[in-house]
Image: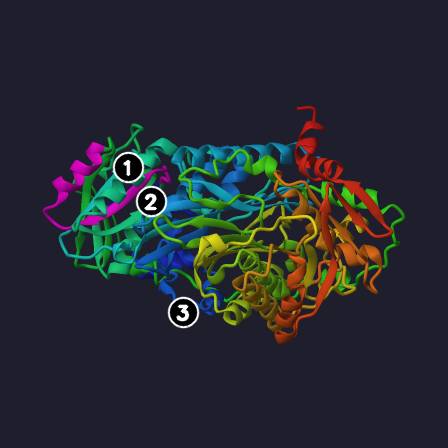
């Protein structure tokens, strides 16, 4: 088992292992590791794969509930949605690869999350994404933005899976570290769920899909460290995707799953063949022995180290019943895909790698999984919080019409149509609510039911108060689902943070996760899985703490869905919830001061739940014509969006200022737990009665009118002018670059 490359302190450090971690490896093995074994430990013990800094905190998340079929620990979470069906979903990050090579980084992020879903036996039916970039006046950010969006579109469109929603934010904190989080939802029969486990001593371990190359080597390690100015040179650590091959792989795997001889299946994602074999053996309580000489290669002269650490895309690992190798091969041959038996399940709980009969690596399975380092990192409240919690006084504007146009033109607030029109969001013909409407709705075939989906997270809030920001992310995701008429069921999360070795970043992480824990318990939305992305720092500058919540809900009858846009002239516009003088953390205050600053709005889980319950009851009683949650930009932006989201309508709003708040605060503050609805004029008393029962204040704002927005005594603007400011903002930023 001798391999030539000597293990030096420099080599250990290059692999992202500390001296203490290396000594632990020596103790586990009872000897020095060879070069291949060092590489295997380095990826399996990386932050990306082992969660060594976060496991002690994540264990407190609520992960069980009446609807949960499969919680954390598998490729994706699974919830029961009735009628023998389950929803399978997860979110993952591809931040570092997207910074180095934005098109392929984003594309392979989509490919990876798709495999996580169909690995479980579910057909993917919807994709969403949460994207964050720096200011668009920076040419590098424009390049990253355009190529990330193109990568998402290029892969998802080719796969025939609709991209139906998501979110896009812009802030200088992401100038050197964009975030690309991909979410996928699939649907399956409950009895057809498959797990990533290797059981049955002697059963064959089968490699299927694309050949293995040198792309992606040490991708997991790269995702577990800070970046610097030289990071763009690391393109070889970014995988190259092929959606056409993945489409074949998806269909072949789903066909195989209709048979009764598949034991377990796992995507070859982060850490490639190393992670899939180790994790499958660990879950099955077995060992695995493979011969890497049998692995299909697309490059000559690949070493055992390279084969085991490659993250080439569109590959899967299967365990089938012994004697069924030919039947498995026949299915993959039909789809023109590689299918090779490379090993077997063994009783000894070791991960054993051979090459033409020569032993290359021999490691106890638990050493790579259960015995990975676990750290309780120091935490310390960041010093900056002492300076950003005060909400400064700002002068009242003199031109409210221009102010509204300027706010609508901010890249974070403006329409994201430029983005989602590049995605095929109608393929499969099940999209019931198009992108841009807060939540998305996917009809279930042969059923009246629909699944509601939302991605939400406000990093500015989490920067100012991680605990409250974490709660608000859950609350907004649930509120978006409720506005369609859907009941929130469960959550997946993508937790994007800085360097966990810095006490301030770890404090932010712990506080944000605690906020998510408390909110998920309150809303009874268990967490079925997710992803932690640490080390989102470049040259020592970290991003804002950015937890993203993906939430899934169920609408029993899609015909009863509610949409955000106004429906007819004369309808009344009503606000559910209370507006307060609390502009802290708002996009308006950021626009006025150039800073993320201020005391966050007051937030009560009890009040939030009551507002959502009121909205659901009003929808159930068919009182609402429309419903839309208030978030970035506050009431002023929400009212305009209710006029503009549906291009087929030419309906505006006439609003009265019946408030003690200063007009700009009334229009643009971001008080929590508010929903703007429209109703027929004869339904006001019924809605007031419901509001009283839930102890939620209700305010009559005005009515729906044709072709313009008027705010009494402040402004009158045509829908055309508002539409240009809102819908053409991002293309305008890109055009201004001279492109």
**Residue 396 on image: x %, y %:** 88, 54
- Whole-angstrom CA distance, mark 1 to mark 2, is 10 Å
Classify 10 Å Cα crowding around label 1: few (below 14), some (14-19), many (20 and above). Answer: many
Write the residue at 67% across / 37% down: 727
10 Å neighbourhood of mark 2: few (<14), some, or many (≥20)?
many
Answer with the quarter of the image where residue 307 lies: top left
The magenta segment: 310-334
Label 1: state its secondary structure. strand
Q: Are marks 1 and 2 in contact (CB under 8 Å)?
A: yes
- The numbered mark at residue 171 is none
For the residues carrying marks 3 and 2, which lies nearer the camera in this image?
Answer: 3
| Labels 3 and 2: the sequence-earlier one | 3
Measured from the top left, where is residue 722 in percent x and y?
74, 40
As helix, strand or loop, the secondary structure at mark 3 comes to loop
Pair 1/2: label in front: 1
Q: Position of residue 212 (x, y in %)?
A: 31, 35
Residue holding disc 1: 209
Task: Identify the residue under disc 2.
Answer: 268
Q: CA distance from mark 3 to mark 2?
A: 30 Å
Q: Earlier in the sequence, mark 3 or mark 1?
A: 3
Residue at figure coordinates x 67%, y 45% from the top left: 643
């Amino acid at each position: 088992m001798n391999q030539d490359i000597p293990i030096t302190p420099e080599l250990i450090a290059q692999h992202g292992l500390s001296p203490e971690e290396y000594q632990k490896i020596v103790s586990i093995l009872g000897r020095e590791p060879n070069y291949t074994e060092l590489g295997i430990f380095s990826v399996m013990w990386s932050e990306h794969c082992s969660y060594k800094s976060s496991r002690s905190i994540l264990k407190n998340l609520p992960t069980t509930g009446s609807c949960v079929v499969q919680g954390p620990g598998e490729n994706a979470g699974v919830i029961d949605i009735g009628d023998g069906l389950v929803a399978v979903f997860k979110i993952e990050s591809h931040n570092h690869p997207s910074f180095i090579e934005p098109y392929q980084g984003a594309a392979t992020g989509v490919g990876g999350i798709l495999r996580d879903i169909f690995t479980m036996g579910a057909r993917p039916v919807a994709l969403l994404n949460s994207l964050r970039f720096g200011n668009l006046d920076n040419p590098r950010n424009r390049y990253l933005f355009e190529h990330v969006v193109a990568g998402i579109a290029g892969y998802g469109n080719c796969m025939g899976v609709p991209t139906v929603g998501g979110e896009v934010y812009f802030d200088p904190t992401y100038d050197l570290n964009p975030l690309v989080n991909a979410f996928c939802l699939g649907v399956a029969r409950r009895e057809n769920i498959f797990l990533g486990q290797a059981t049955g001593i002697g059963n064959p371990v089968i490699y299927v899909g694309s050949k293995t190359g040198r792309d992606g080597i040490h991708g997991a390690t790269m995702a577990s460290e800070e970046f610097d100015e030289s990071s763009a040179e690391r393109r070889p650590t970014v995988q190259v995707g092929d959606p056409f091959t993945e489409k074949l792989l998806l269909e072949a795997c789903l066909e195989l799953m209709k048979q009764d001889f598949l034991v377990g299946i796992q995507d070859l994602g982060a850490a490639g063949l190393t992670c899939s074999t180790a994790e499958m053996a660990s879950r099955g309580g077995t060992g695995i022995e493979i011969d890497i000489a049998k692995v299909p290669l697309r490059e000559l002269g690949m070493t055992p180290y390279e084969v085991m650490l490659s993250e080439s895309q569109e590959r899967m690992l299967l365990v089938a019943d012994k004697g069924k190798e030919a039947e498995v091969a026949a299915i993959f041959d039909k789809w023109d895909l590689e299918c090779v038996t490379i090993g077997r399940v063994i009783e000894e709980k070791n991960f054993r790698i051979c090459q033409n009969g020569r032993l290359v690596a021999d490691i106890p399975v638990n050493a790579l999984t259960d015995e990975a380092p676990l750290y309780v990192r120091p935490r310390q409240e960041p010093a900056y919080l002492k300076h950003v919690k005060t909400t400064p006084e700002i002068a009242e504007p003199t031109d409210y019409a221009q102010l509204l146009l300027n706010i609508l033109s901010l890249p974070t607030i403006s329409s994201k149509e430029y983005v989602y029109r590049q995605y095929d969001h109608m393929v499969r013909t099940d999209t019931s609510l198009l992108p841009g409407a807060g939540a998305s709705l996917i009809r279930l075939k042969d059923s009246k039911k629909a699944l509601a989906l939302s991605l939400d997270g406000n990093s500015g809030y989490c920067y100012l108060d991680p605990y409250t920001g974490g709660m608000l992310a859950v609350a907004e995701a649930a509120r978006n689902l409720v506005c369609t008429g859907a009941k929130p069921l469960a959550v997946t999360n993508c937790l994007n943070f800085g360097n966990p070795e810095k006490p301030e970043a770890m404090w932010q992480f712990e506080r944000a996760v605690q906020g998510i824990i408390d909110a998920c318990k309150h809303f009874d939305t268990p967490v079925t899985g997710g992803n932690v992305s640490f080390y989102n720092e470049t040259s020592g500058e970290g991003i804002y703490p950015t937890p993203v919540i993906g939430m899934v809900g169920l609408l029993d009858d899609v015909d009863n869905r509610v949409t955000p846009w106004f429906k007819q002239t004369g309808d009344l516009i009503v606000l559910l919830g209370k507006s307060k003088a609390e502009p802290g953390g708002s996009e308006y205050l950021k626009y006025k001061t150039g800073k993320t600053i201020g005391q966050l709005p007051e937030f009560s889980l009890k009040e939030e739940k009551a507002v959502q319950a009121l909205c659901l009851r009003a929808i159930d009683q068919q009182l609402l014509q429309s419903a839309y949650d208030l978030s970035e930009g506050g009431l002023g932006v929400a009212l305009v969006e209710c006029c503009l989201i549906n291009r087929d309508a030419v309906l505006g709003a006439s609003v009265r200022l019946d408030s003690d708040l200063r007009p700009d605060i009334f229009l643009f503050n971001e008080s929590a737990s508010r929903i703007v609805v429209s109703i027929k004029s004869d339904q006001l008393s019924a809605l007031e009665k419901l509001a009283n029962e839930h102890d939620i204040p209700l305010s009559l704002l005005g009515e729906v009118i044709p072709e313009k927005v008027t705010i009494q005594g402040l402004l009158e603007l045509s829908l055309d002018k508002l539409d240009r400011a809102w819908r053409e903002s991002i293309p305008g930023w890109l055009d201004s670059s001279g492109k």
